[in-house]
Amino acid sequence: MLADKAYDSNAIREQLASLDCDAVIPSKSVRKAVLPHDAELYKARSAVECTFALFKQARRFATRYEKTLRNYTAVVLLCCIKCWLRI
């Protein structure tokens, strides 16, 4: 799981460990023992956040006007196509 410092808590880390999931979360500055994380993988989080920022420019995506999963999936697909084409 890629997350920012706000999600650096022992409870979240324990839950991820129980799900056999790797936590890529940098430690907060107040944490006494700094926990290691994969810095290169953490940089990928930025790309994901930028993609969601592009998606949110489409109002239908951000406000979830679509009630059915099929229609919402179509809106997500159209947003992906728009991002890919950079229209």
Image (spheres, helix red, strand yellow):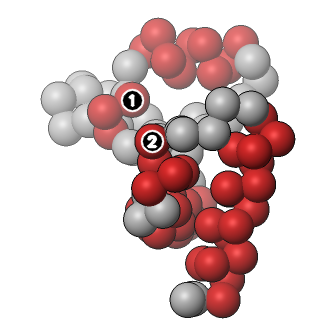
The residue singled out by tag 1 in the image is: 7
Q: Is residue 3 above or below residue 15?
A: below
In front: label 1 or label 2 = 2
What quarter of the picture does the N terminus occupy? top right
Measured from the top left, where is residue 31 in percent x and y? Answer: 25, 27
- Most foreground residue, 24 or 36: 24
Q: Give the CA separation, mark 1 to mark 2.
A: 24 Å
Measured from the top left, where is residue 44 in percent x and y? Answer: 56, 64
- Most foreground residue, 87 or 11: 87
Question: At 63% from the left edge and 78% from the top edge, which residue is drawn?
Answer: 82
Q: Earlier in the sequence, mark 1 or mark 2?
A: 1
The residue singled out by tag 2 in the image is: 63
Label 1 Cα crowd, 10 Å radius (few <14 / some 14-19 / many 20+): some
Instruction: Classify mark 2: helix, strand or loop.
Output: helix
Question: At 46% from the left edge and 48% from the top edge, which residue is drawn?
Answer: 62
CB contact under 8 Å: marks 1 and 2:
no
- Most foreground residue, 68 or 12: 68
Residue 43 in view, yes or no? no
Q: Residue furthest right?
A: 70
Number of numbered tags placed on the structure image: 2
Instruction: Classify mark 1: helix, strand or loop.
Output: helix
Find residue 26 and report its image quarter: top left
